[in-house]
Image (cartoon, rainbow, N blue to C red):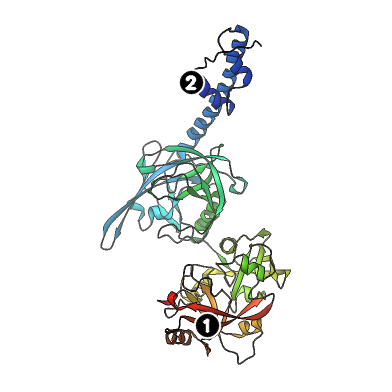
Amino acid sequence: MSKLTKWTVPASMFFLGCLAGGGLLSIPVMNAVRASAVDKAALEEAYEDLNKKVTALQEGSSLLARVAHLATPSVVHIESRRNVPNKGVVEETGSGVLVSGSDGKGIYVVTNRHVIDGAIPGNISISLFDGRVINPDDIRADRDTDLAVLRVNAPNLSPARWADSDKVDIGHMVLAVGSPFGLSQSVTFGIISAKGRRKLKLGTTAVLNQDFLQTDAAINPGNSGGPLIDLQGRIIGINTAIASSSGGNEGIGFSIPSNLVRRVMDQLLEFGVVQRAYLGVRLDPAFDLRSANRLKLDRVGGARVTEVYPNTAASKANLLYDDVILSFDGVDVEDENHLINLVSLTPFGKKVRMVVWRGGNKVPVLVQLGDRAEMREQSAVPTPDMGLPPVRTTSLTPGLKLKPLDFQVRETHRLPARAGGILVNEVAIDSVWQGIVEVGDLIVEVDQWPVASESELASVLKAGQALPAIPIRLMRLEGGKSVEHVVQLPQSKLQ
């Protein structure tokens, strides 16, 4: 190939070459189109090489168009109306996707619960791909996942197929289909940005089971309930939320994985509700490296037990305070929210093998899970954690959740029968107590006054207002032993 000296590359050719080749045009191609002494054979070779790359690019674009063509007939636009006291009629819009029942019988629309929440079937309009508008025959919904299933009955419906969300990886290409801002059958393209997103605050909706897929495919208001699909046109997730400071797309959207959606749907269709198991423990939401090191763990992982409730699956399996649950039913536990998700989506009554970290060793534990619904009935209070009686939030000591001593706490701390104190069960983030006491600490004295209840603690704190800092004596488990500490609560923090 001859050596040429002058550049005469059109900008459009350069841009196409970048797309086709994933970067700059190849060196032989660029050399071939230098102009002072054009080698026609080399130039022909360059065009041929460019055409191959553009053809590959066009084939990829055609593939996306085919995927969108297959998926869009299954996607619907939803409008719902409900009466709200003191507000009148409230309207919601969103998206949904047509699917078949697991038994192959019946066609349903899967969407987000918040799209149709509070509306009766006659006030829910479902706009199909071909322009028809229908109403559902029946509605079943699950608050804890923000999912709803609507039964529909109409001819010539095109249900979508399901994908296995466990097999999707970060970087896989996906399309989001829905009705952003009411613009039906809109398709956007992106990748899976992350998996297993939890601890998300989704407006006023309290979602217990969080295991979201994160995507940068554009999702906007109105996309809620629509599908996230893979390159085979199958549902990989149900689009639910966005992280945004403007209210519009900023490249961070969240979808409920298809495997979770299918399980919830099957339960709703079979039982009318989602049956969930419970373990019977309270977990440490602030389990960090300092706490892990105290328990002789070299990294943060698993879920630390801060309380075992009596007459529960956990107590019958002899779980203990300060156990760290590392594995549940063969799955490594990432954090307390991951464990909550695993437990609540396991059929109650199932015997599950766990691995816990106790006293510097891994200990196998076999537990038979209880029925979450029964536990809720016993506590008479719907709870946001694992179906357990809630620990009372104190008003006298804001930022702390406290628990009186019981036999188990005394045994764990190896305390004599007459020893007093009050157990720290939770420390609110950004409270005055953050960094001073930890979950599991046993507060014994405040300003040299013994305390054994919330009211005593609050009284002593009030009496010590004249001090620049209030000394607090507490016992903290370290390496399996209860070690005494004296900490200082600055008076400025209480003002």
Q: Is residue 380 above or below residue 193?
A: below
Which residue is located at x 59 percent, y 74 percent? 306
User: Horizontal and vertical percent for residue 123?
Assistant: 32, 52
Residue nearest the viewer, comparing 92 with 465 = 465
For the N terminus, the quadrant is top right
Number of disc labels: 2
* Number of the label disc, if any, that sits on residue 12: 2
Which residue is located at x 61 percent, y 7 percent? 39
Residue nearest the viewer, comparing 391 with 353 = 391
Q: Which residue is mark 1?
A: 471
Any part of residue 215 in sight? yes
Which residue is located at x 52 percent, y 56 percent? 264
Question: In the rendered structure, which amino acid carries the disc numbered 2?
Answer: Ser
Going by the image, does 214 lie left or right of 396?
right
Q: Is residue 341 above or below residue 482?
A: above
Question: In the rendered structure, which amino acid carries the disc numbered 1?
Answer: Pro
User: Horizontal and vertical percent for residue 150?
Assistant: 43, 51
Q: Nearer the viewer, mark 2 or mark 1?
A: 1
Residue nearest the viewer, comparing 139 with 83 = 83
Under circle 1, the secondary element is strand
Q: Earlier in the sequence, mark 2 or mark 1?
A: 2
Which residue is located at x 66 percent, y 84 percent? 414
User: Horizontal and vertical percent for residue 409?
Assistant: 61, 82
Under circle 2, the secondary element is helix
**Gap in angstroms between the C-alphas marked 2 and 1:** 73 Å
Going by the image, does 280 lie left or right of 93?
right
For the C terminus, the quadrant is bottom left
* Number of the label disc, if any, that sits on residue 486: none
Q: Which class describes the residues within 10 Å of circle 1: few (<14), some (14-19), or many (20+)?
A: some
